[in-house]
Image (cartoon, rainbow, N blue to C red):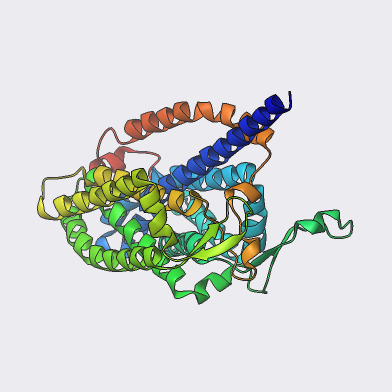
């Protein structure tokens, strides 16, 4: 009987571990999709660089304007999935580093307002002001999101004390160790490096989307030239961050004691221990490069957004899984190493994860609807003639 009880507990433990890994995969997938959808922000950051006339600017705004809801919804869903599956991360990062996240959210709200009000009759600020707001979101959003993701590798300044749960006056488990509340992410230059890598990647994807979605020869020719201009800094920042990350010490978890220790070449070891992630990463990088190179040298090629977009999803998914799997602390603490968050010490209960896993069965149907809506919206490329006939253009 005792053996049966032990076996039952082993099964329960293995199920719990599986659910933790399953939900980290879903959260990572949402994060990867969000980075791809930042092509909206990347395209907006180029409004006054690529467009030489108001008509060309209108084409660009309407091209990204038909997709901004996908990006905003994915950002909110990403945060919601983290809240439901790993609530301690949500309370620590979103509650502690609130200045960083508030600036990100404010920039996205600014984007939504700009799209909806720039062409309204009688708006007080004028159309050009709202277009500048779109540019601000196009620059601030990707850089800050990239810097926030970089803290998964480089750590943040917080302290966890679960003993505070018994404190009736202030039952706060986590607290930020300084008064910067997230802005201290910019004191680590490597967070900024990834921020700029995401920014230039978003610009590249925005260019590729314009090439696929807009029919204006002069504008598209400038988009192809801009690909070269943005590809060079992207490769510099991306390769610098990846190489440094693979060579740096990482935050490893002792599976028996749950103690956090520094392990040399931890993230490189993770790739070797999980070769399927190494393959996913390399395939993703190859997809991004293929989409870029062919779009630059083949003037008739318009499908680069799909090769580069899928490659982006694969690459980011591989990096996020590397930072969470194989006994790794996915949110390290620079103030107290033992406060670092892992899949095991920050997740919801087994019951909650199991119930949500049943709900996640609906995800493929949601994705299918998104694909259907996307194809319906992009059934025809955008032209100046179409916008003149469209009563709902931005």
- Whether residue 63 can be seen here: no
Residue shown at 63% from the left, 33% from the top: 10
Whether residue 72 appears in this view of the structure is yes
Q: Is residue 152 left or right of residue 315?
A: right
Task: Report x, y in % for residue 48.
Answer: 31, 64
Write down the quadrant of residue 243 in the picture.
bottom left
Foreground pick, 71 / 83: 83
Question: Would you say 147 lies left or right of 337 here?
Answer: left
Q: Nearer the viewer, residue 230 or 50?
A: 230
111 and 117: which one is in front? 111
Asked which quadrant contains residue 127, the reply is: bottom left
Residue 133 sits above or below residue 183 on the image: above
Q: Quadrant of the N terminus?
A: top right
In percent of width and height, residue 164 lies at 81, 59
In the image, residue 291 lies at what x, y percent?
A: 21, 49
Q: Nearer the viewer, residue 111 or 129?
A: 111
Badge count:
0
- Find residue 261 and report its horizontal and vertical position in percent: 56, 63
In the image, residue 173 sits, relative to residue 388, either above or below, namely: below
Q: Quadrant of residue 245?
A: bottom left
Give the residue at x 47% y 64%.
147
């Amino acid at each position: 009987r005792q053996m049966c009880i032990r076996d039952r507990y082993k099964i329960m433990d293995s199920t719990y571990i599986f659910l933790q890994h399953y939900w980290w995969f879903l959260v990572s997938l949402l994060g990867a999709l969000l980075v791809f959808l930042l092509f909206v922000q990347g395209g907006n950051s180029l409004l006054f660089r690529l467009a030489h006339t108001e008509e060309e600017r209108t084409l660009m705004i309407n091209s990204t304007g038909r997709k901004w809801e996908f990006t905003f919804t994915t950002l909110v869903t990403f945060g919601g999935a983290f809240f439901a599956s790993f609530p301690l991360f949500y309370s620590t990062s979103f509650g502690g580093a609130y200045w960083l996240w508030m600036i990100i959210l404010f920039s996205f709200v600014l984007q939504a307002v700009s799209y909806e009000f720039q062409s309204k009759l009688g708006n007080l600020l004028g159309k050009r002001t709202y277009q500048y707001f779109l540019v601000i979101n196009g620059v601030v959003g990707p850089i800050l999101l990239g810097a926030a993701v970089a803290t998964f590798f480089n750590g943040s300044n917080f302290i966890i004390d679960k003993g505070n749960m018994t404190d009736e006056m202030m039952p706060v488990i986590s607290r930020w160790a300084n008064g910067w509340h997230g802005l201290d992410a910019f004191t680590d230059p490597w967070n900024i490096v990834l921020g700029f890598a995401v920014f230039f990647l978003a610009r590249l994807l925005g260019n590729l989307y314009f090439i696929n979605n807009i029919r204006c020869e002069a504008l598209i020719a400038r988009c192809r030239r801009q690909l070269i201009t943005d590809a060079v800094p992207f490769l510099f920042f991306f390769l610098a961050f990846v190489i440094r990350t693979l060579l740096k010490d990482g935050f490893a978890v002792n599976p028996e004691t749950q103690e956090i220790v520094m392990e040399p070449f931890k993230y490189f070891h993770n790739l070797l221990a999980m070769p399927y992630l190494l393959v996913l990463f390399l395939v993703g990088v190859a997809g991004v490069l293929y989409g870029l190179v062919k779009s630059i040298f083949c003037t008739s090629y318009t499908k680069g957004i799909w090769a580069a977009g899928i490659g982006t999803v694969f690459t980011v998914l591989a990096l996020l899984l590397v930072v969470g799997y194989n006994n790794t602390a996915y949110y390290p603490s620079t103030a107290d190493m033992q406060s670092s968050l892992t899949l095991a010490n920050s997740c919801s209960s087994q019951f909650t994860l199991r119930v949500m896993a049943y709900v996640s069965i609906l995800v493929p149907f949601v994705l299918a609807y998104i694909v259907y809506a996307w194809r319906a919206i992009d059934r025809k490329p955008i032209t100046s003639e179409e916008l003149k006939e469209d009563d709902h253009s931005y």
